[in-house]
């Protein structure tokens, strides 16, 4: 069964843009995934304990019939191939891919929660997600991505900067969509 899936991607090690493009390549080359939209690229301060280099972040909207846990496995394997440590949570990493939203699904599994548990608190995810899903209602919250983003923007927090000088490979700049 085909589902619309929104992904959040980030990188703060090595050639950050190249690592993010590897995730896009996986989507473009997989026979059961179709790229529907991508956000612009943003540079963001690290959010969490300690200090880390800045991240590049963006979001993708895909359509796929791949079961969600298998999709999670595909992206986690790519993260590890690029050098992410198995215990890489809250540590610097070449690639981080999160499944943020899936249609209007709400689910809790030991390996995956949808919507993503921290989605509504992370401006570095909400801003790029607004590029491609501003009117999408976040299940559990009953508010649109844009509404939640506006709430978070009013608070003090880390900088999120649009990087107009960075363009995704594979002709993705012409697939950018605003809601």
Image (cartoon, helix red, strand yellow):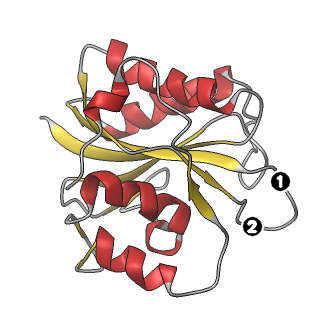
Q: Position of residue 175 (x, y in %)?
A: 27, 32
Q: Position of residue 94 (x, y in %)?
A: 70, 33
Q: Is 1 located above or below residue 138 in the figure?
A: above
> In the image, is 144 to the left or to the right of 114?
left
Q: Secondary structure at mark 2?
A: loop
- At label 2, counting other C-alpha atoms closer than 10 Å, the crowd grade (few under 14, some 14-19, many 20 or more) is few
Closer to the camera, 15 or 93?
A: 15
Q: Residue at x 57, y 24 (%)?
A: 78
Q: Residue at x 71, y 60 (%)?
A: 45
Residue 124 position by quadrant: bottom right
Q: Residue at x 83, y 54 (%)?
A: 52
State the residue lying farthest toward the front: 165
Closer to the camera, 122 or 70?
A: 122
Q: Position of residue 169 (x, y in %)?
A: 46, 20
Residue tagged 1: 52
Q: Residue at x 53, y 21 (%)?
A: 22
Q: Disc number at residue 48? A: 2
Which quadrant does the N terminus fall into?
top left
> In the image, is 128 to the left or to the right of 48?
left
Instruction: Measure how far apart labels 2 and 1 are at the Cα level.
Output: 9 Å
Nearest to viewer (mark 2 / mark 1): 1
> In the image, is 49 to the left or to the right of 40?
right
> In the image, is 20 to the left or to the right of 106?
right
Closer to the camera, 18 or 85?
A: 18
For the residues bearing labels 2 and 1, Cβ distance under 8 angstroms: yes
């Amino acid at each position: 069964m085909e589902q619309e899936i929104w992904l959040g991607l980030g990188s703060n090690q090595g050639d950050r843009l190249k690592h993010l493009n590897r995730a896009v390549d996986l989507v473009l080359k997989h026979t059961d995934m179709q790229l529907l939209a991508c956000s612009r690229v943003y540079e963001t301060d690290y959010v969490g304990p300690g200090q880390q280099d800045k991240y590049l972040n963006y979001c993708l909207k895909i359509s796929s019939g791949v079961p969600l846990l298998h999709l999670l496995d595909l992206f986690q394997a790519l993260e590890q191939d690029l050098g992410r440590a198995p215990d890489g949570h809250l540590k610097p990493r070449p690639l981080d891919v999160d499944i943020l939203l899936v249609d209007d699904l709400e689910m809790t599994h030991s390996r995956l929660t949808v919507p993503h548990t921290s989605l509504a608190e992370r401006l570095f995810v909400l801003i790029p997600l607004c590029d491609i899903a501003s009117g999408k209602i976040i299940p559990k919250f009953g508010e649109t991505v844009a509404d939640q983003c506006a709430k978070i923007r009013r608070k003090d927090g880390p900088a999120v900067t649009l990087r107009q000088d960075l363009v995704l490979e594979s002709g993705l700049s012409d697939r950018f969509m605003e809601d």
